[in-house]
Image (cartoon, coloured by chain):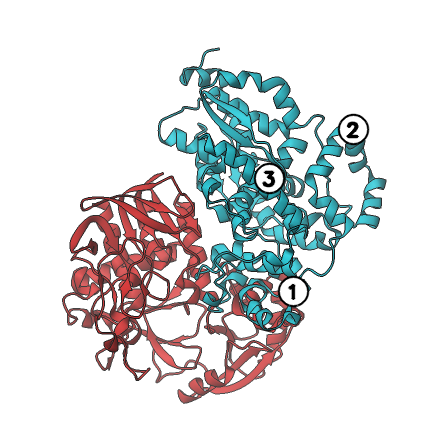
């Protein structure tokens, strides 16, 4: 049994805070919710008091989204968001509610929901059922609830794609994550098809949810179990010399940084082998190792939105440069700010209004740019932007797949048929 | 990953130089470890305020009297400095920063402590005076915000009275400020600024108008217009007399506004601003810096024809120190500093502090050196520079930053 009190922030450097408050100026939550004391006060500043006496622990810390924008802004490299998450684990004095459990257990809910996808999708679109969910579970009725796929990505892959992968000499592993598996298998299949077209085979990681929804909903022991499982599974792949690709900025950040920084697990040997597929593809193209050939007239006006965790990873440059390779496309990187959904946060009834207020400026900027399509490496942002603006928002890999001339690409990379 | 020029550090120097390069068709990446010292800027930039013990009115007159290794002399003396700084000024204006002032003659601006000090350029919504002998207003309403501790109406009033203003002090409150006061420690200028749009701004204007009485000018803390000047203009149009801001204690809205406008302009020109990333080391071939590595890009090295170190001074972690040493943390470049620690500082806090002169050693073209060997394509600009100048007491910080930035930008274009 893992005790929640075991947790400790890596780089526990709260004393480096010079109280400048630059972090608070970039916090999406303080902008809309004055109950949240802001990152400086909740993080390093409050830590000094909490060390003295835990009576200074404050449940307003639950309002933190763990977006990490405070850490990106901090001139002194203080691990502000890490400090906040860990103190929440340590001193949470109530078990998570049924709703938070349901929202956090993406694997469990996703597994059941895909099996009964017709019923679940119908129910999630039904006004009366949504009212009931709102009243009983406090899942906001104004949200469009996720739709589940007929078959999981893993099942489709195993049945229709797995066999063909054996023909490839170069291989990568793919950590597809819950969103691809249960909600958007198309995205995963697009990646497999792109990689195959440039001569790279794919195998799937034996995986559980990365754990971010569990961390954010207070199921930290469950998160740690998933993390141990994933690290072990990825380690076996990395030991064979394969990189592990992802298509979600949140899963990526969680496995690279959160496992070590806040869950205290040793992932040093695998960290640098986990990266977003956009980064992997861009690097291969940049080094002249592969070629992508696009359809003529595939160019679009694309607004690239940097999700919070993408901002923390610092990798927007890869995804947007990759999108810019499509001839005739115009990719603009929007000024980075939080979309407001933040995983499960925006679904909760008590957060709906704040969530939409946080995203307001982003929606305005996107609408002003008036793109053909929005791209983001975060499924949660894409859901929020698709439902809050008139534009479709998708993963960059989806846009690449739509624009790619697969036949010509295979030929350019010396792949037969 | 490759660009023509890569800047390590993302403050005033890198942004202005980066914009100049982009405008001339080069590709530019800026790598910025956390937000820059611009977040602490009062909204005034100084070219030179003091020469030895004399207050300077016309900075250009004194430049050729400076020691030969002073950055102003290195860029070519008074006329060259004039050209470079004026070009930097034009770039800042093009980015949308509205400024008052000229290099020919310093004006006076009001510090948060109510002291009038000289400046070269100041944000146009701030109170500035051409001379302290002639006061353009009769009576000033100095209006603070209840519970906001980074603005001192008493000090401001004292400073204004000294030069002949009549003053009335007061504070205002609005529903928005009431909410902010839930977290008294976060009652800071940028947080206030974020509430001052639309209805929040109207409520603030209404509250201000009730405290103007018979005054002909209102003076408020600089808490309006975080992203641009628009809210300032809206507020001015709603207030019943002339309205000026005075900078607050940092973290300061004026500097953040300058940074946001510069960064937006830089990005709109196609520049890459990698926020929250930091350079970790470089791959050298003899005297040539081939590429650098960064924390976030990991095994993707960043290549460039030229690299510019703009990481700032001790405050910004561009220089680090322990009890005996001062060093440059990215490449361990040669650094000028006093070996004897006892001579790092003057015990009288108000005296010029020798450590202010510590910084990276550069040749006549601001190229850095490693173990005595000058590097062909690595330059240093801004506060990381060492040399015989004290940005604080001489009031040359922004001027040296911008002159060195523009000079190196020109070198990159050769």
Instruction: Residue at 23% x, 77% y: name it.
Output: B343
Q: Which of marks 2 and 3 is nearer the N terminus?
A: 2
* In this view, the mark in front (2 or 3): 3
Q: Report whether A382 appears left or right of A126.
A: left
Instruction: Residue at 39% x, 82% y: name it.
Output: B115
Q: Quadrant of residue A7?
A: bottom right
Q: Which mark is residue A118?
A: 2
Does residue A389 appear anywhere in the picture? yes
SS for dot 3: helix
Chain under disc 1: A
In the rendered view, would you say B130 is above or below A343?
below
SS for dot 2: helix
In the rendered view, would you say B87 is above or below B165?
above
Chain under disc 3: A
* In this view, the mark in front (1 or 3): 3
Which one is nearer the viewer's eye here, A17 or B218?
A17
Chain drawn red, letter?
A: B
Q: How far apart are marks 2 and 3 (CA)?
A: 31 Å
Judge the density around disc 3: few (<14), some (14-19), many (≥20) Cα neighbours within 10 Å: some
Q: Which mark is residue A34?
A: 1
Does residue A277 appear anywhere in the picture? no
Which one is nearer the viewer's eye here, A329 or A170?
A170
Judge the density around disc 2: few (<14), some (14-19), many (≥20) Cα neighbours within 10 Å: some
Q: Earlier in the sequence, mark 1 or mark 3?
A: 1
Q: Residue A229 carries which label?
A: 3
- On the image, the x and y values in percent for residue B166 come to 48, 88
Which one is nearer the viewer's eye here, A258 or A335?
A258
Q: Colour of chain A?
A: cyan
């Amino acid at each position: 049994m893992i005790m929640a009190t075991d947790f400790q922030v890596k780089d526990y450097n709260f004393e480096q805070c010079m109280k400048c408050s630059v972090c608070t100026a970039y916090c999406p939550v303080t902008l809309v919710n004055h109950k949240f004391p802001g990152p400086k006060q909740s993080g390093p500043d409050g830590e000094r008091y909490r060390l003295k006496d835990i009576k200074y622990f404050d449940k307003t810390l639950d309002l933190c989204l763990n977006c990490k924008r405070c850490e990106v802004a901090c001139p002194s490299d203080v691990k502000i968001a890490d400090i906040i998450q860990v103190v929440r684990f340590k001193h949470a004095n109530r078990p998570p509610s049924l709703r938070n459990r349901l929202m956090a257990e993406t694997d469990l809910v996703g597994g059941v929901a895909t099996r009964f996808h017709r019923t679940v999708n119908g129910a999630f679109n039904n006004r009366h059922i949504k009212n009931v969910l709102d009243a009983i579970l406090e899942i906001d009725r104004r949200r469009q609830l996720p739709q589940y796929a007929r078959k999981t990505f893993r099942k489709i892959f195993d049945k229709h794609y797995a066999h063909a992968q054996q023909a490839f000499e170069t291989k990568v592993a793919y950590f597809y994550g819950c969103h691809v598996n249960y909600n958007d298998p198309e995205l995963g299949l697009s990646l497999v098809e792109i990689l195959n077209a440039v001569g790279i085979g794919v195998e799937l990681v034996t995986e559980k949810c990365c754990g971010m929804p569990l961390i954010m909903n207070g199921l930290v022991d469950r998160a740690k179990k998933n993390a141990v499982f994933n690290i072990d599974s990825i380690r076996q792949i990395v030991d064979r010399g394969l990189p592990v690709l992802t298509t979600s900025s949140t899963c990526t950040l969680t496995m690279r940084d959160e496992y070590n920084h806040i869950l205290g697990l040793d992932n040093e040997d695998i960290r640098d082998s986990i990266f977003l597929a956009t980064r992997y593809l861009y690097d291969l193209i940049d080094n002249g190792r592969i070629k992508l050939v696009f359809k003529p007239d595939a160019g679009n006006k694309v607004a690239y939105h940097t999700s919070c965790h993408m901002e923390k990873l610092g990798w927007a440059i890869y995804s947007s440069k990759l999108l810019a390779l499509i001839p005739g496309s115009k990719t603009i990187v929007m000024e980075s700010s939080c979309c407001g959904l933040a995983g499960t946060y925006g679904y909760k009834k008590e957060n709906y209004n704040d969530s939409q207020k946080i995203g307001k400026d982003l929606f305005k900027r996107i609408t002003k740019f008036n793109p053909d399509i929005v791209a983001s490496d975060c499924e949660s942002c894409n859901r929020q932007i698709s439902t809050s603006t008139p534009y479709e928002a998708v993963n960059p890999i989806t846009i690449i797949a739509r624009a790619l001339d697969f036949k010509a690409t295979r030929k350019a990379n010396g792949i037969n048929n | 990953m490759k660009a023509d020029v890569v800047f390590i550090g993302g403050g005033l120097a890198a942004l202005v130089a980066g914009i100049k390069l982009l405008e001339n068709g080069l590709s530019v990446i800026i790598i910025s470890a956390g937000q820059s010292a611009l977040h602490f800027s009062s909204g005034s930039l100084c070219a030179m305020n003091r020469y030895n013990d004399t207050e300077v009115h016309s900075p250009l007159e004194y430049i050729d009297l400076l020691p030969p290794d002073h950055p102003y002399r290195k860029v070519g003396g008074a006329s060259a400095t004039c050209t470079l700084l004026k070009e930097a000024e034009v770039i800042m204006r093009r980015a949308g920063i509205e400024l008052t002032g000229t290099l020919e003659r310093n004006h006076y601006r009001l510090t948060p402590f109510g002291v009038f000090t000289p400046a070269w350029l100041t944000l146009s919504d701030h109170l500035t005076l051409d001379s302290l002998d002639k006061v353009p207003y009769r009576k000033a309403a100095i209006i603070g915000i209840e519970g906001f501790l980074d603005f001192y109406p008493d000090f401001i009033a004292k400073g204004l009275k000294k030069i002949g203003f009549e003053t009335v002090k007061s504070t205002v409150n609005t529903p928005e400020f009431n909410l902010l006061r839930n977290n008294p420690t976060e009652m800071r200028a940028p947080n206030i600024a974020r509430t001052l749009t639309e209805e929040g701004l109207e409520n603030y204007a209404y509250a201000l108008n009730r405290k103007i009485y018979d005054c002909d000018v209102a003076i408020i803390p600089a808490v309006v217009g975080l992203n641009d000047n628009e809210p300032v203009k809206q507020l001015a149009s709603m207030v019943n007399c002339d309205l000026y801001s005075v900078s607050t204690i940092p973290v300061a809205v004026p500097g953040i506004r300058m940074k946001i406008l510069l960064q937006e302009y830089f990005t709109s020109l196609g520049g890459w601003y990698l926020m929250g990333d930091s350079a970790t080391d470089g791959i050298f071939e003899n005297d040539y810096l081939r590429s650098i590595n960064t924390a976030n890009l990991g095994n993707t090295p960043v290549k460039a024809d030229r690299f510019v170190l703009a990481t700032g001074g001790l405050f910004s972690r561009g220089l680090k120190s322990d009890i005996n040493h001062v060093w440059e943390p990215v490449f361990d470049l040669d650094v000028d500093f006093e070996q004897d620690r006892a001579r790092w500082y003057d015990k009288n806090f108000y005296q010029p502090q020798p450590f202010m002169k510590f910084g990276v050693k550069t040749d006549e073209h601001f190229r850095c050196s490693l173990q005595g060997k000058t590097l062909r394509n690595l330059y240093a600009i801004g506060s990381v520079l060492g040399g015989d100048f004290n940005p604080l007491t001489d009031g040359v910080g922004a001027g040296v930053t911008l002159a060195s930035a523009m000079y190196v930008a020109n070198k990159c274009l050769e």
